[in-house]
Image (cartoon, coloured by chain):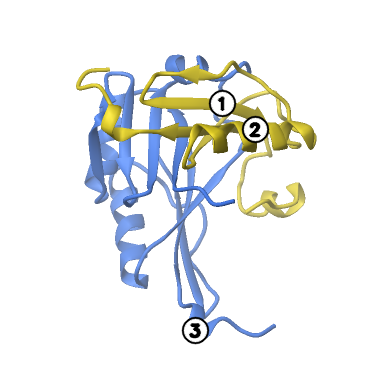
Chain colours: A yellow, B blue
């Protein structure tokens, strides 16, 4: 739920973060590497920005974007069948 | 576009204490995704919370971890009954969390909330969509 800052403020006794810190990173899983690329490309074409380099762990592929309000999203595809026993 | 899973990542100071807290209030741990710098709490088969040490969390963002004096996120989770909502919040409070507001009862939705031992805010809800008012 994206709430206007004023409305969000009614649910917490602390001030809304000013965008110079990060309390949360939201990681979302999609169905393929292509979907990861597509989502991040669409986001950055529409005002999002890149804040870190893509990571490719083999079993997991991840790209990130920062949205219009500075919230940071990690978009990932993971192939659990490729998950190493130790990592 | 739909996603198939979500991992809410939050920074913490102490992994072991965090693991104990979330276990005591009734959630299970995915040990495969947990180690000395992260603990993965299972909310359901597609929704997870990854609590990372502040140092590890910091490697994923170019901005500093907040000092606990602001709020960027409130995580709202839905349970299956009013009783489950109260049970989780009461267990949280009994284990070091604090309730930051009185339960809210909207008829179709019941909500209780707590701030966890790391200062992250949780809204715990039960919603009966059949009772959702038209307006």
In the picture shown, does residue A28 fall above or below A22? below
Q: Which mark is residue B130?
A: 3
> Mark 3 and mark 1 in contact (Cβ < 8 Å)?
no
State the SS at label 2. helix
Question: What's the residue at 24%, 51% (across, down)?
Answer: B26
Residue where numbered disc 1 is placed: A63
Question: What's the residue at 59%, 15% (across, down)?
Answer: A53
> Mark 3 and mark 2 in contact (Cβ < 8 Å)?
no
First in residue order: circle 1 vs circle 2: 2
In front: A29, or A1? A29
Tell me which chain the residue with mark 2 is part of. A
> Mark 2 and mark 1 in contact (Cβ < 8 Å)?
yes
Q: Which mark is residue B83?
A: none
Q: Is residue B83 left or right of residue A32?
A: left
Tell me which chain the residue with mark 3 is part of. B
Label 1 neighbourhood size at 10 Å, few (<14), some (14-19), many (20+)? many
- Counting from the top left corner in percent of width and height, residue B117 is at 39, 36
Q: Is residue A51 left or right of residue B95?
A: right
Residue where numbered disc 2 is placed: A40
Quarter of the C terminus of chain A within the rendering:
top left
> How far apart are labels 1 and 2 at the CA level?
7 Å
In front: B5, or B86? B5
């Amino acid at each position: 739920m994206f709430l206007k800052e004023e409305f969000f403020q009614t649910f917490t006794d602390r001030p809304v973060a000013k965008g110079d810190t990060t309390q949360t990173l939201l990681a979302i899983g999609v169905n393929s590497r292509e979907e990861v690329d597509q989502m991040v490309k669409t986001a950055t074409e529409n005002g999002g920005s890149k804040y870190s380099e893509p990571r490719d762990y083999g079993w997991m592929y991840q790209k990130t974007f920062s949205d219009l309000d500075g919230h940071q999203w990690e978009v990932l595809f993971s192939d659990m069948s490729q998950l190493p026993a130790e990592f | 576009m739909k996603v198939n899973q979500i991992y809410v990542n939050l920074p913490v100071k102490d992994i072991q204490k965090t693991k104990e807290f979330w276990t005591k209030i009734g959630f299970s741990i995915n040990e495969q995704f947990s180690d000395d710098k992260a603990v993965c709490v299972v909310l359901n088969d597609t929704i997870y919370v990854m609590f990372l040490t502040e140092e590890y969390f910091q490697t994923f963002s170019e901005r500093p971890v907040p000092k606990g004096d602001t709020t960027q996120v409130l995580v709202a989770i839905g349970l299956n009954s009013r009783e489950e909502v109260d049970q989780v919040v009461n267990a949280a409070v009994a284990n070091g969390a604090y309730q930051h507001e009185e339960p809210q009862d909207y008829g179709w939705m019941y909500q209780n909330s707590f701030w966890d031992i790391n200062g992250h805010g949780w809204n715990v809800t039960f919603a009966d969509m059949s009772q959702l008012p038209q307006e």
